[in-house]
Image (cartoon, grey):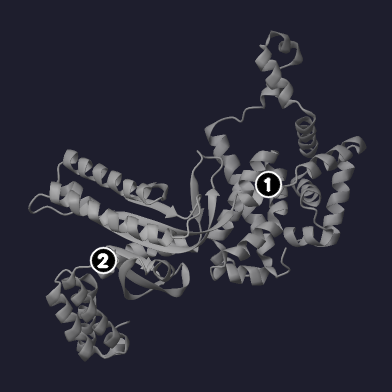
Amino acid sequence: MTHDSDVELVTRTLQGDAVAFGTLVERYQQAVHAVCVSILHDFDLAQDLTQEAFLKALQHLRHLTIPARFGNWLRIIAVNECRLYIRRKQATMRPERPFYEQVSWGQAHRMSVEQQQELHQQQDEHDRLGVAALQALERLSDTHRQALTLHYLSGYSLKEVGAFLGISPAAVKMRLHRARQHIQKEAIAMVEQALTQHQLGPEFAKRLQLADITVLFADIAGIMDIFAQYSPEEALTLLYECMGDMTQCIVDTGGTLEGYHGDEIVAFWGSPVPSADHAVQGCLAALAIQAKVAVLNAQHHQPGKPHLHVKCGLQTGKLFVGELSPRRPPAYNFIGMAAGIASTLEGANTRFGTAILVGGETYEQAQDSIEARPVGQLKSRRHPEPITAYEVLARKGTLASSKMQAVARYLEGLEHYQARRWEQALPAFTEALHLDPSDGPSRFYQERCEALLAAPPEVIAL
C-alpha cells in the first residue's frame, strides 16, 4: 500500500485520479467495516454498508474542507449510512431472526431432511461463533463497542484508532479496557476470535473495480411538447419505439445498459467485458441512435407537431464499476468523475444546437473512426478544469461534401473567435450557415460575435 498522505490522495482523487481513491479504500476498508459491524450487528450487512459509505464519500469528497481528516469524515458517513439503513428498515418491516433462531431443537424432528440440512448448515462453527460474539458485543455501549470492533477488525494501533474516531490514544485504551471489563473473561476470547475471522478479505476491493470505460447519457429532448401535441397513445408509441431503438443501438455495439432514468438512457462500454475501442463503440452507438431517430421522424412525424430529438453526451475515463448496490436488485453500474462530465456534455447539446457531444478523452481515442469538430469549453461545478467538447458528426469518411464545406468555414471562424477577432469570425460563421442553415455551433457563435461587436467585451462572458 502506498505511503502517500490522506491529503495527497484526496487531492489526486479530486483531480480525477481514481487509483488514489482505490488506495483510500484499501487504507480504511477494515476500519469502516468495524464501525458498521458495531452498529448493525451483522457482518454481511456491514460489508454492504461499508461499500456504500465509500461510494457516498466519493460522491461528496469535494465538500471535505479538511482533507487531513478524511478518516474521521469517512467514519461519520459510515455511521450515518448505517443509521439511515436502520430507520428505513424499521419503517418497512420488523427484521426477521435467522432461520436457525426461529426453530427450536424440539421442532427439528418434524422437519424434512432438506430443512434439517439447512438448519445444520446455518449452525456451523463459524456462524455460531459470529452470532455469539455479536450478542456479547450488544451488552456494550456504542462507544465501547465501536472501539473494540475497530481494534480487532481493522488491526489498527491505538493511535490509528484514535485518529479515525477523533479521540486520543489514551481515550481509546480506556474504552478498550472498559469494554473488556464488561464482557466476561470467557467471552472476550470468543469475541476477539470472531472479529478477527470476519475481517474483510481482498475480495472486498474487487467490489469496486477500476476500469477505463466510455459512458453515454442519451436523453429524449422536448418530451413534454410531444405529450402536449400528440394523443397519449401516439406519444407513448413513439417514445416506446424510440427507447427500444436506442437500447438496441447500445446492445449492437457491445454496450452495457446501466438503466433508464425517465426519458434518459445511461450506458457504458469497456466493462464488464474489456474492450480496447470502447470510445469508438460509444460514438458509433450515438450515431446509430441519431440514424434511428431520423427514421422514426420520417415514419411518425405529423405536420405542425414537434420532431423527436435525442441528445447524447459521452466521456471516457477511469471509473469504479461493479454491482455497486448489493442490497438492491443486482445491477452492474459505475461511479466516477467521467460520468458527471458525460451528463454535462449531454445537457450542453441544447446550448450549441448539437446532437452528440463528447469529451476530449473520448475524442482522442475515437478520432480515427469518426468525423468530429471542437465546439468549445464548458465549465462545471462538478469538474475543476474546463471540459473541451467535440461534436461527433459521422463515421470517418462518410460526411457529405456540403457539410464538410460548412465545417471548414466554421473552423476558420472558430480560430478567429478564439483569437478575439470578432470582425473576421462573424462572416465565416455566416457563410457556414449559408452552406448549412441547420448548423447549430455556427449559429451559436454567429450570435455571440454579433453580441460582442455590439457591446464591450467585458460586458459579456466568453
C-alpha gap between disc 2 and disc 1: 47 Å
At x 16%, y 68%, the residue is 438
Residue 343 in percent (x, y) is at 39, 61
Q: How many marks?
A: 2
Q: Residue at x 86, y 41 (%)?
A: 182
Q: Which residue is painted at 19% across and 54% down in the image?
A: 294
Quadrant in the picture for the N terminus = bottom right
* Mark 2: amino acid: Thr
The first of marks 2 and 1 along the sequence is 1
Q: Is residue 213 left or right of residue 398?
A: right
Q: Position of residue 260 (x, y in %)?
A: 37, 46
Which residue extends farthest front?
397
Q: In this picture, is 439 found above or below 321?
A: below
Disc 1 residue type (three-letter): Cys
Q: Nearer the viewer, mark 2 or mark 1?
A: 2
Which residue in the structure is indicated by mark 1?
A: 36
438 to 327, vertically: above or below: below
Disc 1 crowd rating (10 Å Cα; few below 14, some 14-19, many 20+) is: many
Q: Which mark is residue 350?
A: none
- Quarter of the rendering containing residue 413: bottom left
The residue singled out by tag 2 in the image is 354
- Identify the image quadrant of the C terminus: bottom left
Taking 279 as reference, is 273 left or right?
right
Observer-nearest of 140 and 431: 431
Q: Position of residue 312 (x, y in %)?
A: 32, 59
Q: Is residue 211 left or right of residue 167?
A: left
Could one spot residue 13 in this view of the protein?
A: yes
